[in-house]
Image (tube, helix red, strand yellow):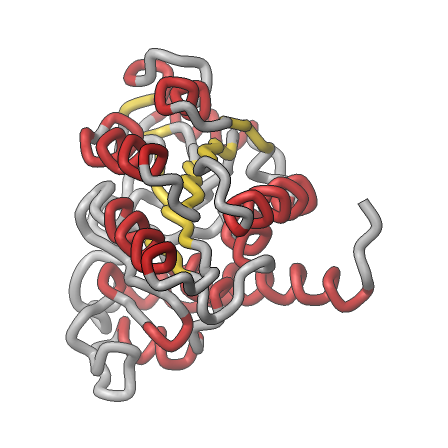
Amino acid sequence: MDLSRETLIKLYTSMATIRNFEERGIPETGQRAMSGSVHSSAGQEAVPTGVCAHLSDEDYIGSTHRGHGHCIAKGVDPKRMMAELFGRSTGTNKGKGGSMHIADMSKGMLGTNGVVGASIPLAVGAGLTSKLKDLKRVAVAFFGDGAANQGVLHESMNLASVWKLPVIFCCENNGYAQSTPVEYALSTANVSDRAAGYDMPGITVDGMDVFAVYDAAGQAVERAGMGKAPLCWSDAPTGSTATRSSTTPSLTAPRKKRIIGAPGTR
């Protein structure tokens, strides 16, 4: 894969900004400067960066409770995001949403979401709007391995496939749903294996390799824009190096071992 210098700088800048944002913001939660729970996306920079590099402001993404990286990669102003975390009126949602409810419609950011899997049908709805109005826009539903067993994901995948919507289902598999290892809860080797049940292609990509993600995302976005069946992929493994949230600071022993043994983001 031959990438231009401009693209390489864009990818690096996105990942560096996400990591710096998390390292600056998360420590503040311990000082009670922020209200509400905050979930860091440190260690998962490659996935939103590689995907959103192919999206325009007009395209849509549905995010998760761990969505700072999605927001930044999609072009949301980090300063306004930080103001939102601190409850300031200059925040993206005037300080009323906090970490799990950051939204910016001018960037196609439908919102981070405090409910596991809840943004998936929002992305499908955005994809339906795009198709009905012939907007030529793509919608990406980001979700984690914990949401992979939520009924709403399967309902959404089914409708997206039946209606041939321009939607990409992207699972960020960081190996744990809170403290439950993915192998204890998933019946298939990869989340993307489930795509066959909805007559859509499924692929698995190394979520720690921004170049692999970028390449796969480019093909997925092109496919979605051509009006073909939706696509589901899982990024495995991603390496969330942060705690589950600012209110659950401790890590289980198995998860500590997995993080210590995980490679750094490439």
Task: Give the side of residue 104 with respect to residue 239, left or right.
Answer: left
Q: Quadrant of the C terminus?
A: top right
Residue pictured at 47% horizontal, 32% vertical: 234
Q: Is residue 63 visible?
A: no
In this rendered view, identify the residue nearer to me: 5 or 57. Answer: 57
Residue 78 lies in quadrant:
bottom left
Residue 199 higher or lower than 60, as above or below: above
In this view, 52 is above or below 264: below
Q: Is residue 36 left or right of residue 232?
A: left
Q: Looking at the image, which is closer to me, 95 or 54?
A: 54
Q: Is residue 207 left or right of residue 35?
A: right
Can residue 11 be seen?
yes
Determine whether 78 is above or below 174 in the image.
below
Query: Residue at horizontal 39%, vertical 13%?
Result: 188
Residue 95 image point, x, y percent: 20, 79
Q: Position of residue 173 (x, y in %)?
A: 43, 33
